[in-house]
Image: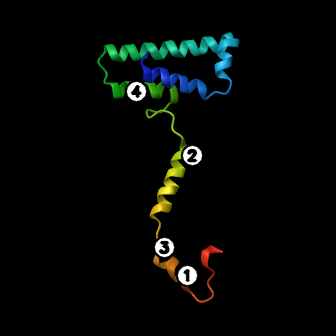
């Protein structure tokens, strides 16, 4: 198994609380994880034998494990980054300026 696939499988196991311990104590969990590991290894070897490019192999492995070709995506981190980018590029619009500069207007949106 390639380092990428091994790392992806490890992250998959780590996403499930208690899974690492269960692999040693629960024969059903161990069997299921081993079956998935064998499937990933077989799929990766087949793609390598067929000459599938590395980038495509990674996307296929991600799709098998995570259901998405880009892999596990932290949606909350993406939203935070989008908010930070928006805050960094924010500038008041003409209407916001007019509202804040009216006599008796309360500044700071209060």
Where residue 40 appears, as percent x and y from the top left, is 47, 17
Residue assigned mark 3: 92
Measuring 54% from the left and 46% from the top, which residue is drawn there? 77
100 in relation to 51, above or below:
below
The residue carrying mark 1 is 99
Which comes sooner in the sequence, label 4 or label 1?
Answer: 4
**Which badge, 4 or 3, comes first in the chain's sequence?**
4
- Compared to residue 107, the image places residue 52 above or below, namely above
| Circle 4 residue | 58
| Secondary element at tag 4 | helix
The residue depicted at 60 percent of the width and 26 percent of the height is 14
| Label located before the other in sequence (1 or 3) | 3
Q: How busy is the neighbourhood of tag 4: few (under 14 within 10 Å), some, or many (20 plus)?
A: some
**Quadrant housing the N terminus:** top left
Query: How far apart are labels 1 and 2 at the CA level?
Result: 33 Å
Q: Give the distance between the C-alpha atoms of the residues marked 4 and 3, in whole angstroms.
A: 43 Å
Cα–Cα span, label 1 and label 3: 11 Å
In this view, the residue farthest toward the bottom is 103
Left or right of 109 on screen, residue 68: left
> Residue placed at 63% from the left, 87% from the top?
104
Q: How is the image coloured?
A: rainbow
């Amino acid at each position: 198994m390639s380092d990428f696939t091994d790392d992806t499988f490890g992250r998959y196991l780590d996403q499930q609380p208690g899974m690492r311990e269960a692999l040693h104590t629960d024969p059903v969990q161990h069997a299921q994880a081993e079956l998935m590991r064998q499937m990933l290894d077989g799929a990766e070897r087949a793609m390598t034998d067929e000459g599938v490019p590395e980038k495509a192999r990674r996307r296929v492995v991600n799709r098998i494990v995570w259901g998405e070709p880009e892999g596990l995506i932290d949606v909350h981190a993406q939203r935070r980054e989008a908010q930070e980018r928006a805050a960094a590029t924010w500038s008041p619009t003409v209407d916001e300026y007019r509202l804040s500069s009216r006599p008796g207007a309360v500044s700071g949106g209060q």
